[in-house]
Image (tube, grey):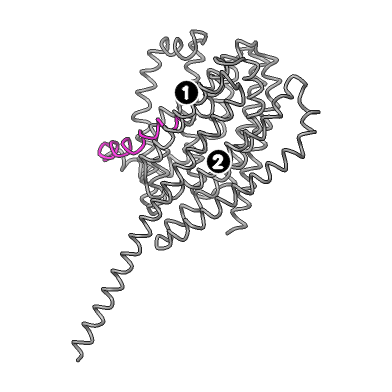
Amino acid sequence: MKNRLLKHFIQCATTSLLCRGLIFLMAPITVSFLSPSEFGLLSLTNSFVVIMTIIIGLGLRNVLSLEYFHGNKETRTKLISDLIITYFLIALPIFGFLLINQSIINHYFFCNQSSTSLIVISFTLCFFMFLVEFFQQLLQYQAQISLATKLQLTTAVCTVLLTIFFLSFFHLGVTSIITAQLLAILLIYGKSFIAIAIHNRNAIFLSLNKITKRIPYYLNSGLPFIPGMLCNWIMASGDRWFLANYSTLHNVGIYTIADAFGSLFHIIVSNSIIAVYLPHLLQQFADHKDKLPILESNNKKIMYLSMAGAFIVVTIGYFITRPILFYILPYAYQEAISYIWLTFIGYILLMGTYFASIFIQFQKKAYFLSLSLLLPALFNIILNRLLIPHFAIYGCITATISAYLLYFCITLLYNYRLQARYTFFFTAQYQKENESIIMSKSTGKRKRA
C-alpha cells in the first residue's frame, strides 16, 4: 500500500513539474506574440475563467468530496449522475443569461477591451473546465492516478502546440490562446465525457425523473463553499493588487518571481498530496469507522512529520541553490532571491491545513469547510493594507504567512475538537454495548439457574 501511494505521489509530482515547465517554456513565445496590453487582457481572461468556473460550479465538486466515500458503488454512480445533471440544468441557463448580457461582463471584467468572440470562447471554456476538474477528481478518488496524470500531461502538450499554431497562423492574440485551451480540453477529454455519459446512461435517465427533489439538497450542500473558494483565490492573488496600489509595479514583479518558487512547491507537493493521500485516507475512514480516532491520530503524525520534513528540505535546498540563483536570474530580478525562503513558509502551513481538513471533510462539516477561510482572508486583506505601505514586499509576505498560520490553527483546533467529540461518543457507545452484553449474559445465567 505504501509503495503504491509513493508511486502515485511521484507520478503526480512529476506530471505537475512537467506541466509547470511547459508553462515556463511557453512564456517567451507568448510574450513575443502579444503586446503588453494584450498580455494584460490575457491575465484578466484567465482570472475571469478561474472565478467563473468557481461560481458556475455551484460547489458541486465539494458535494462529491463530502458524499463519495459514504456510499457503495450503486450510490456513487447515482451521485455522479445527479451532480452532472444538476450542473447542466442550472449552468446552461446561467451561461445563456450571461451571453445575453456580455456587454456588462465586458465592462466590469475586461474594461471594455474584449471582443465578443473572446467572451463567448471564455464562457465555453468555463463550462467545460468544470467537467474536466470533476472528471479529474473522480479519477483521483478511484485511484486511477496513471490515467489522470496522462490526461493532464497530454492536455498541457496539446495546449502548447495549438497555442503556437493559432498564434503563428491566425494572429488573433488572446483569442488564439483561449481557443487553444478550449480545443485541447475537447480533444483530450471529449472521449472521456462521452464514455461517462454512456456508462451512466441508465442512472442518468433514472435521475432525470427524481432530480428535482434532490437538487435543493445538492445546492444547499455546495453553494456555501463558493465564498470560501473565492477567499482562497483572494489569498492567492489579492496580495499583488495591494502591492500594485500601495507600492510599485516593480515590487509586484519581484514578489511574483519569489512567489513562483513557493507556488511550484504547492503545485508539486501539496496538490499531489490532495490527489493521492486524501482519497486513500478517506477510503480508510470509510472502511474502518471503528478505528477513526486511531487513523486520524496517525494522520496528524504524518502531517507534523511532513511539515517538519518540508521545512528542513526547503531550508537546506534554499541555501544550497541560493548562489546558483544569482547566476540564473537577471540582475534586475535578483532582489527576489531574498524573499523566496519566506514564501515557502506560507505554503508549508497551507499543506498542513490540507492534512488537518481531511477528517473534517469525512465528517461532512460543510459549513466549517466553506467558511473557515473567510476570517483568514479578511485578516490577510487588513494586514496587506496596513503593512504594504510601510514594508512593501516584507509586509505582503508577513500578511500572507500570518493568514495561512491563522487558517492552519483554526482548522487544526476544530479537528482536535471534532476528534475528541467522536472519541467520547465512540467510547460511550462501546461501554454501552459491553454493559448490554454483560447484562444479557447475567440474565442467561439466572434463567439456567
State which quarter of the image contains the C terminus.
Answer: bottom left
Residue nearest the observer in this picture, 49 or 242? 242
Q: Earlier in the sequence, mark 2 or mark 1?
A: 1
Question: What mark, if any, has residue 113 been given in the picture?
Answer: none
Question: What mark, if any, has residue 349 been given in the picture?
Answer: 2
Give the image location of residue 62, x and y in percent.
Answer: 41, 39
Counting every numbered tag in the picture gives 2
Dot 2 falls on a residue whose secondary structure is: helix
Residue nearest the observer in this picture, 347 or 117? 347
State which quarter of the image contains the N terminus.
Answer: bottom right
Q: Residues within 10 Å of mark 2 (few under 14, many from 20)?
A: many
Q: Is residue 176 left or right of residue 379?
A: right
Give the image location of residue 305, x and y in percent.
Answer: 59, 52
Name the residue: 45% across, 9% down.
Answer: 107
- The amino acid beneath tag 1 is Thr
From the image, tell me which residue sits under label 1: 124
Name the residue: 66% across, 30% down.
Answer: 339
> Where does the magenta region start and end?
210-231
Magenta residues: mostly which secondary structure? helix
